[in-house]
Amino acid sequence: MPALAFIFCETRPHPTGESPQTDWIGEARFLLDPAADLHHALQAAHLDEVGHPDNLSVQVSAEALFEDGEITGRTTLSAADLATLTAHLPDAHHARVLAWAAFAYALEGQGNEARFVIWFVK
């Protein structure tokens, strides 16, 4: 069972005709304890083990690179995925996860793309 959950929100500006695609930037790091609750919810929602894209932000890549433990359960979610996930979490976590989604929607409302990069450490 995982001991820690690493949850990062990354953003980048939506590409426009005038500006090319830019790199992702680590915006925030979130916590959820116990990690097993998130792990089980991801499995129940069939959102586990989606994997990580190749274009992670420098901040998130560095966190993963320097992790001493065994990384498992790599997945990437959208703000909309968090609504699906919430249905599978204990009630005590609902407000927290909905706040994460609200954070991402606020960034998206400012013209950014947002995603959540998640993994677990044993």
Image (spheres, rainbow, N blue to C red):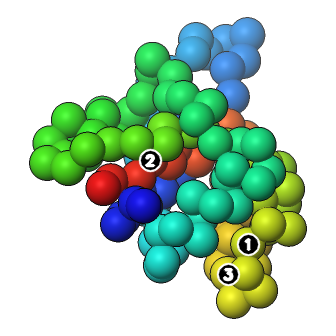
Image quadrant for the C terminus?
Answer: bottom left
Residue at mark 3? 93
Q: Which amino acid type is marked by label 3?
A: His
Q: Earlier in the sequence, mark 2 or mark 3?
A: 3
Residue at mark 2? 119
Q: Earlier in the sequence, mark 2 or mark 1?
A: 1
- Crowding near the residue tagged with mark 3, few <14, some 14–19, many ≥20 C-alpha atoms within 10 Å: some
Q: Which amino acid type is marked by label 2?
A: Trp
C-alpha separation, residue under disc 2 versus residue under disc 1: 17 Å
* Foreground pick, 103 / 44: 44
Q: Give the numbered dot on residue 52.
A: none
- Left or right for 6, reference 64: right
* Foreground pick, 67 / 88: 88
Residue at mark 1? 89
Q: Of the residues tagged 3 and 1, which is closer to the observer? A: 1
C-alpha separation, residue under disc 3 versus residue under disc 1: 6 Å
